[in-house]
Every structure is written in C-alpha cells, then in structure tokens.
Image (tube, rainbow, N blue to C red):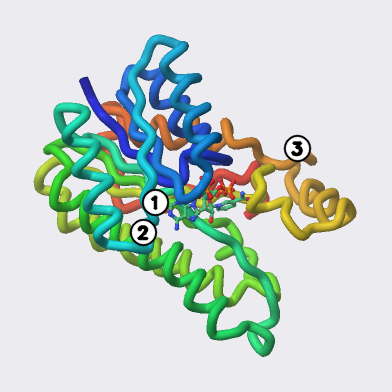
Amino acid sequence: MRTAIVTGASRGIGRACAITLATQGLAVVVNYAGSDGEAAQVVSEIENAGSRALAVQADVASASDVARLFDQAEAAFAGIDVVVSSAGVMTTGHIAEVGDDEFDRVIDVNLRGTFNVFREAARRVRDDGRLIGLSSTTLALNAPGYSLYNATKGAVEGMVRVVAKELGGRGITVNAVAPGPVETGLFLDGKSDADVQRMAGMAPQKRLGQPDDIAALVAFLASPQAAWVSGQIVRANGGIA
Ligand code: NDP
C-alpha cells in the first residue's frame, strides 16, 4: 500500500488533499499543529470511507517534530511514498510595517517548515516517491503587501527545482502547486466581503478556488501516472495568471 504524509491536513487545502489521496487508495498521515478535533474528524472521514489514516501533531517549524512525524508514519505504515507540504501561514502588510516577530513566524512555518519536511522526505521516501510543495499565484501577481509571504513561496519554488534534480535518479518527482485564491481560513481571515468578492472576480469563472480544485492536481502529481512531471511549478487559479 502506498502511504502519504500531508502536513497541515486538519483544515483547508491539506485536508482536501488527505481525503482525495485516501480515496485513491493511499494510507494517509494527517499532520496538524493545534487543531486536534479537526484532525480527528479528517481521520474519521477517511476511515469511514474504508481507507487508513493516522493523525500526528507536529510543528513543521521544528526539525525534531518533523522527524517524529516521519517516525510515526513509518511505524504505522510500511513506508512513505508521497509527501505533501501544505502547512502554511499567510501574512500581508507593507514591508515598512512588518515586524521581526512576524518575519520569524512566517519564515519558520513556510520556509523552514517546507525545508524540514523536504529534507526528511529526501532521507526517507521510497524510490518512485512524490514530493509536492505549496507555492502561490501571489508570486505572479506581485501585489503590494505580499513581500514576506512571496519571499517564502519563492524559496519553496527554488527548493523544488533543485531537489527535483537531487532525487530524480531514484524516480522521485518533486513539484509545487501554486494556487490562486482558495476559500479557506488562510484566505478569508481578515478580509472584508468586498475584498473577497473583488478577488473572486479576478478569475474568468468569477469564483474562488475550492480546496478540492487544488487536491485534484495534487492527486495527479502524487500518482504513478505523473512520473515524467518533475521540477515544475503548476499554477491552479482558474486562469488569473
Ligand atoms: P489553512 O489556514 O486553511 O490551513 C492551514 C493548515 O496548516 C492547518 O491544517 C494548520 O494546522 C496547518 N499549520 C499551520 N502552521 C503549522 C505548523 N507550524 N505545523 C504544522 N501544521 C501547521 O490554509 P490553506 O489550506 O489555505 O493553505 C495551505 C497551503 O496553501 C499554505 O501553504 C498556503 O500558503 C497555500 N496557499 C493557499 C492559498 C489560499 O488562497 N488559501 C493560495 C495559495 C497558496 P492547525 O489547524 O492545527 O492550525
């Protein structure tokens, strides 16, 4: 049986990825930071549909937590084949107003977190495995306020292109998905209804992305059929950019 670890799988895009991968027959490790109840619900949903899942709390910003996450995954299932690094936080604000604490928090989760997860995956994922990171279409839009967030996502894209070459000889592919606005807590928190409507209107289909829109692409990249797609950043944004 193939096994996936999905970080940040208690909510939003990670949750949809975990459920979609389970429907495709993978056992899934549902990682989360603090949302025990939500993570347990994701596990129940997967188990009720007849697949296997395990919730594991781990802060992706901590290398030792990430090592423990992989330890628990290997102990529960035979080995690890797919790693989706979805855990992330969002911040916006003019660069002149960004504080040091905010800088540390966003770098720790989005950049150090992806690094910790990719490094552990590089050590442990079985041959022909799949690594998938989360970037963002905000990198293409360059809107004011996104300097710090975009810096972390640019770093994710840079890592993906290099690690794809480092692991490719073992048949492991490494890609990133770069969504446009997706209707999750991360996107909605702190935005006015008018802002949300304006951003939904940017897409030719005049709607926000849904977590399942992203999970479908992640599931393809995680599949054996995607063996010849590696080192790529794939935007999923309804055609915004
Ligand atoms: P949500 O806020 O809906 O969910 C975030 C998830 O990440 C939660 O499961 C949360 O766990 C987890 N998480 C946060 N910090 C940590 C941590 N330190 N360690 C482990 N888990 C953590 O976010 P989205 O689903 O919207 O975002 C997922 C990814 O997609 C992010 O990388 C984001 O940057 C990217 N993205 C999102 C877009 C959007 O519009 N939504 C657009 C483009 C990219 P808990 O519940 O326990 O807090």
- In the rendered image, which quarter contains the C terminus? bottom right
How far is disc 3 from disc 1 in space, using C-alphas?
25 Å
Say which of 103 and 23 sits in front. Answer: 103
The amino acid marked with disc number 2 is Thr
Q: Which of the two discs, 3 and 1, labels the residue nearer the N terminus?
A: 1
How far is disc 2 from disc 1 in space, using C-alphas?
7 Å
Say which of 64 and 2 sits in front. Answer: 64
- In the rendered image, which quarter contains the N terminus? top left
How far is disc 2 from disc 3 in space, using C-alphas?
31 Å
Residue carrying label 1: 133
Q: As drawn, is 222 to the left or to the right of 40?
A: left
Residue drawn at (28%, 46%) of the image: 69
Q: Position of residue 185 (x, y in %)?
A: 66, 48
Residue carrying label 3: 205
Regarding mark 3 in the picture, which secondary structure is present there?
Answer: loop
Q: Position of residue 20 (x, y in %)?
A: 46, 25
Regarding mark 1 in the picture, which secondary structure is present there?
Answer: strand
Residue carrying label 2: 114
Residue drawn at (63%, 72%) of the image: 146
The amino acid marked with disc number 1 is Gly
